[in-house]
């Protein structure tokens, strides 16, 4: 059980995502550092490479200066959990050398606002699921048949598909509105141009922490040993390109122009205190998808739209608890055919919508295909995302005075090239 | 123009895939070598690392002992084409040191039968297209409507989707029949078990040779500068899993349990002499998909089914020339939205079928959903692939006495685990 009384000798604001209960992992750079593994506490990053220069972590230091977390994660959960616990100990122990040696403190701790966070992992394969029942129902209602909004397979398996890893960027980037084929309703032929219906998708994703060999499968009961942690994820989507291209093999150019991840991987261990019961799953699933225990997680999610030089508008307030399928079920399904997974693979939730309109996870749903535009605090309206808008996803867990959060997953849409 | 009179002082059988006009690239290992880049001539591999030990290639030797070809390919076409031409020179020049120094010859040349070919590239992202009009028409006829077999988008863009890179294996491997959900026609609910309809897909693939940045696109006219070369590809598919899972986001577990590539990357330069005119594309495509010149390629393709301890049965005789969309169009489409590509990415053709029944590229089509079983030379029948069957794809170009081939793309299906 986590020690709720645990306190860091570094002051942490009550609304900080980076309490001593979190201790996530990431990669940072600044003028002096090309890339070091770091953790976070309050408004600081903790440079683990520098921490180990005083042998405080008792590990191979070279892993801590790699470009990505992959090698660190490959050390295994026993080791990465030990390192995380060691950091918690150093931050909570009253006689920590970090507390007493000011020069050393300044080498190890840097203000988050002074560093640049980099892509945390080298993603091998990226999979996107479609596991939110409210999202699937909304989309099915809009595009197919309200009476049969869910396709026949939906309640029997976590539908998923493969996505493009190359264009996944870390929070803070910008990208150009994609161009592509769209088929106007009043035309026999497609036209080419910038997407007019550029959308967001509120998602989370988990990062694989342990590889399997081809032919092996991971059970729901063992899945947590293969999940290193979670990130926030925005699966940007061009709806007009998607509608025209996606039959029969699924979305392609409508998704692969850009996706955004948050830079901190919050470990599954840090999220454990916030587990909760999920949706009841009826009809009963096949045995390989059944699980025991509370496997959903209470993660409060918010999405903000910020026009250029404007203010943040809260446009979505939702929760990860609305997922119909758990990560453990997604991973069991993904591997039940013997598909092998590698450390650094990323598996995303799919657009996450809750039952209430303000919990819908895409502009498509929020504005109901553009029929109910959002009103922003500057008086303007949005049906979809405008050029130069920034989208910021935030997420955190909070319970019994413990707060564990993800920081931001932010990106800006530039005009088409 | 290639010199058709070019001859190697090493004897090359007339039916060898590895004439002096080919000079492909791959990675091999044996008892003494963990992994070296190699080329091939006749029945030999040529160890390029050893060749460079006598400074015969005038390049950075360390690149030649990497696990994958990626760094070599990243040197750029100017350099890799120079190396290829240099090898051709060494193999054709009468006074080559290789010819005169027997000890050196034995260090550099090894019998192909004595070495193991490894995975040639570290694949970043893998994309599969759906660009054979005969295949798409067959599938549309079987599963939808013979009168409207092609979906409305098919003749306007090369439909494609993302696949799983982790389970792509080099020729010579075996894998277990996948298990998964299937929905029998006479049941309301899905069942779980080994796939009963395990299929092959005859494909080729091209390997990206030059990266782009997000936001950039590659025109059809410039595409060949981004294509390093081609391989043979078998996109194993579990049809019963596919039918149940694939709506609305495309195939997933029905494809990602295993795929097979041939070990030699045949360069685009070696394939140039075999270019030919492709299908007429009507209706006219949007400008970004139009191209000039002869961009299809005359590659003769054969697929053999070999039961355990049995003989090879030729089950497909087809040709790459039947592709409706060219590689140049596929790449232009893939990048037109700004999607970035990396060296080592793999883009596959999609199942390649010709117009005649013996040219169909899958068991699904060959046996027309199992209604017309194939008769093998041992008297047995096949509707789909049986346990312990091996599937071997072969491919080569031949023209004016020049032969350029791919070797084999072979794998064996083991019983479900």
Image (cartoon, coloured by chain):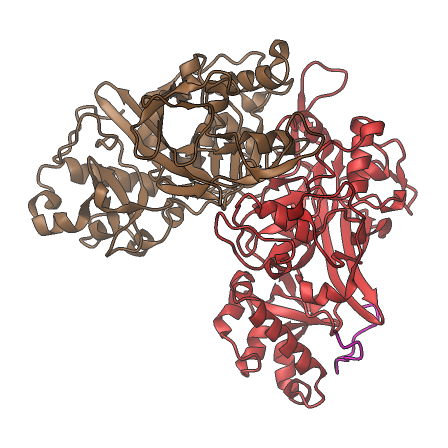
Chain colours: A red, B brown
Residue drawn 58% across the image and 78% down it: A51
Report the predominant secondary structure element of the magenta stretch.
loop
Residue at the location (56% across, 45% down)?
A: A166
Q: Nearer the viewer, residue B354 or B220?
A: B354
Q: Residue at x 25, y 25 (%)?
A: B403
Along the line of sight, the residue nearer the viewer: A381 or A23: A23
In the rendered structure, which segment of residues is drawn in magenta?
A: A1-15
Horizontal side, residue B148 vs residue A403: left or right? left
Q: Quadrant of residue A157?
A: top right
Residue A2 inside the magenta-drawn segment: yes
- The foreground one among A279 and A197 is A279
Q: Is residue A386 magenta?
A: no
Q: Is residue B377 above or below residue B266?
A: above
B368 sits to left or right of A394 = left
Percent across and percent down for residue B237 are 51, 32
Residue B381: tell me if it is visible.
yes
| Residue B216 visible here | no
Question: In terms of image quadrants, where is residue B381?
Answer: top left
Q: Position of residue B396 (x, y in %)?
A: 31, 26
Q: Quadrant of the N terminus of chain B?
A: top left
Residue at the far top in the pictured view = B147
Q: Position of residue B21 (x, y in %)?
A: 24, 30
Q: Is residue A399 above or below residue B332?
A: below
Please identify the quarter of the rendering in which residue A85 is found: bottom right
Answer left or right for A406 relative to B69. right
């Amino acid at each position: 059980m986590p020690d709720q009384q645990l306190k860091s000798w570094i002051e942490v604001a009550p609304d900080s995502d980076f309490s001593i209960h979190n201790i996530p992992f990431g990669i940072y750079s600044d003028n002096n550092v090309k890339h070091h593994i770091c953790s976070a506490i309050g408004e600081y990053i903790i440079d683990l490479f520098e921490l180990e220069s005083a042998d405080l972590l008792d590990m191979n230091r070279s892993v801590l200066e790699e470009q990505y977390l992959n090698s660190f994660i490959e050390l295994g959960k026993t080791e990465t959990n030990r390192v995380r616990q060691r950091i918690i100990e150093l931050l909570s122990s009253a006689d920590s050398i970090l507390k007493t040696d000011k020069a050393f403190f300044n080498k190890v701790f840097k203000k988050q606002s002074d560093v640049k966070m980099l892509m945390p992992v080298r993603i091998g394969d990226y999979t996107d699921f479609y596991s939110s029942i409210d999202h699937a129902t909304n989309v099915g209602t809009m595009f197919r048949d309200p009476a049969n909004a869910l396709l026949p397979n939906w309640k029997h398996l976590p539908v998923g598909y493969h996505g493009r890893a190359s264009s996944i960027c870390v929070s803070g980037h910008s990208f150009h509105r994609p161009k592509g084929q769209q088929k106007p309703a009043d035309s026999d032929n497609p036209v080419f141009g910038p997407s007019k219906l550029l959308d967001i998708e509120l998602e989370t994703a988990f990062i694989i922490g342990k590889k399997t060999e081809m032919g092996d499968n991971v059970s729901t009961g063992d899945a947590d040993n293969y999940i290193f942690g979670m990130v926030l994820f925005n699966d940007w989507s061009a709806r007009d390109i998607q509608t025209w291209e996606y039959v029969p093999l699924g979305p392609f150019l409508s998704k692969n122009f850009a996706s955004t991840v948050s830079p901190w991987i919050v470990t599954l261990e840090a999220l454990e205190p916030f587990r909760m019961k999920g949706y009841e799953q009826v009809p009963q699933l096949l045995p390989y998808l059944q699980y025991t225990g509370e496997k959903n997680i209470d993660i409060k999610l918010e999405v903000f739209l910020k026009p250029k030089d404007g203010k943040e508008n809260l446009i979505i307030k939702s929760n990860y608890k609305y997922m119909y399928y758990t990560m453990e079920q997604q991973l069991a399904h993904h591997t039940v055919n013997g598909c092998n997974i590698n450390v650094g693979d990323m598996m995303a939730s799919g657009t996450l919508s809750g039952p209430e309109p303000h919990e819908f996870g895409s502009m498509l749903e929020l504005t109901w295909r553009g029929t109910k535009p959002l009103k922003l605090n500057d008086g303007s309206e949005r049906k979809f995302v405008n050029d130069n808008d920034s989208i910021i996803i935030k997420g955190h867990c909070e319970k019994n005075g413990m707060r564990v959060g993800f920081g931001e997953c932010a990106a800006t849409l530039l005009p088409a090239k």
